Amino acid sequence: MTTCILHPKFCERNSHLSHPLYEREKSRENIAADIWRDFRNQYLRTFAVGTQILLDLQSFDPLQDTPIEILHVILLGIAEYLVNDLVNSVLVKKDELRQLMGYLKDYKQSKGMSRKFTRLLSGCASYLARDYKCLIQILPVILVIKFTGNPVLKNITPCFIQLGQLCSLVFVRAIESGLETYIHEVDTAVKGLIKQLLVYDKNCELNRHNPYTSKLKAHLLTHLPDNIRRFGTPLHFETEKGEQFNKHIREHLFHTNKLNTSKDIGLKFAKQTMMRHILDGGSWPVENGLRLSRGKGIKTYIDYTASVHKFWNVLFGGSREFADNNDDGSIVNSELCDDTFALFMPMHGGSQTVHPIIEKVSSSQVIHLHIDLPTDIAQKNNYLLAREYSGMSTLLEELKMIRILDMYTKVGDAYVINLSKFGSYWHFYPYFSTST
């Protein structure tokens, strides 16, 4: 019979195998089975140690202490499901798909969307989260206005409308007032989306359609209101912040030779962290137990150049605020181009309560617009209509911009306020609440 003795190195690394049973000659098959069993058990023990320690903490509740990720649950979840169905299964005629692509291409001219959709619909299988961010903001208004009465889209269009309303609510950075009302609206939007998904599942005639309401990501949406009440707006959840940090890593990759990217990136951020510690006033040990810190000249220079030359952003790219490309909170009036629609407030409103007004930028002036009374159709399809006041305008320098609006689409002489744009629905919520 063929025999084998365990290698000495193996016995040294695995002392529990140094047993008289293994010192005797055994068959090759038995030794191989024993080695595999011990390696498997050791791997499983190592794999379970980290999670077991976390779960043993009495203060940790995985259900309540782990917020859902809107990146994977919404963008790479519900949005991905609906877009793939729309492109691959619903719009089976090439003319309809070509028409939709034409509207998306034309939407690049919109001044209200800083991020443009530049991909082809035929490549939806390789879309990234940023592509879905663009689509879920403009697809609802395109399907409602441009494809009205199309029987092919009657089941999937309401799903996009509800998804656009939910995303407009959750992709915000702060809620300054009315938090409970905001959470209630998020809860209503989640229930409305799941309800429309259920209708779509029941009426879907696609072969091998896996009901979306039976998927885990649809269920996780129901926990979103509680997560917001516990942790704040979803854009500040730790998972979302971590994903946003990827863009800073990509920026540093451009300055490497791409041969050892992990090491280069690690050293780059380590040096930035040490330099930031020094420039922030931190100290470091030297000989004789003394500690040194930055001089007064460095502090004076940083304080002077912080607002003028953006010293921190130039030297420390990773220290910038995590902000989405659609975040228009830092845009000033001088950066607004013609035909841009935005919400404005008077620069000096006094002690009186002043409500935001919609204006259309035209050179150094803005043209006033008034909002039509919301109709049932507009409220159902998540949009409002606004029209120009004849001959009423104000100097741009007298107003303060609050938020840029997407009003690229028109119905007759009225501009369509796209409430699916991130943050827009919450700003115009009072119009719906007072009309009902």
Image (spheres, rainbow, N blue to C red):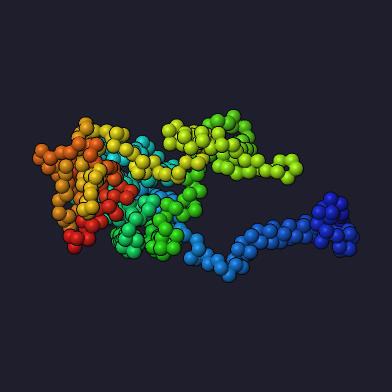
User: Can residue 375 be spotted in the picture?
Assistant: yes
Residue 408 place in picture, x, y as percent: 23, 40
* Percent coordinates x, y for residue 429 in the rendering: 25, 56
Q: Is residue 56 found left or right of 129 in the rendered image?
A: right
Q: Which residue occupies 56% across, 37% down?
A: 296
Furthest-bottom residue in this view: 58
- Name the residue at 32% across, 50% down: 423
Q: Residue at 66% of width from left, 61% of height from top?
A: 49
Examine the image and state in which quarter residue 392 appears: top left
Residue 178 found in image quarter: bottom left
Q: Camera-side residue: 123 or 130?
A: 130
Is residue 88 something that shows in the picture?
no
Q: Foreground: 292 or 178?
A: 292
In the picture as drawn, the residue positioned furthest to the front comes out as 296
Task: Specify the quadrant that holds the C terminus.
Answer: bottom left
At a point 62% along the width and 32% down the height, the residue shown is: 259
Query: Residue 53, located in which quarter of the rendered image?
Result: bottom right
Q: Position of residue 116 (x, y in %)?
A: 34, 38
Is 419 left or right of 282, judged from the image as shown? left
Residue 129, given in percent of the width and then of the height, sits at 42, 45
Q: Quadrant of the N terminus?
A: bottom right
Front-most of 358 and 248? 358
The number of numbered discs placed on residues in the rendered structure image is 0
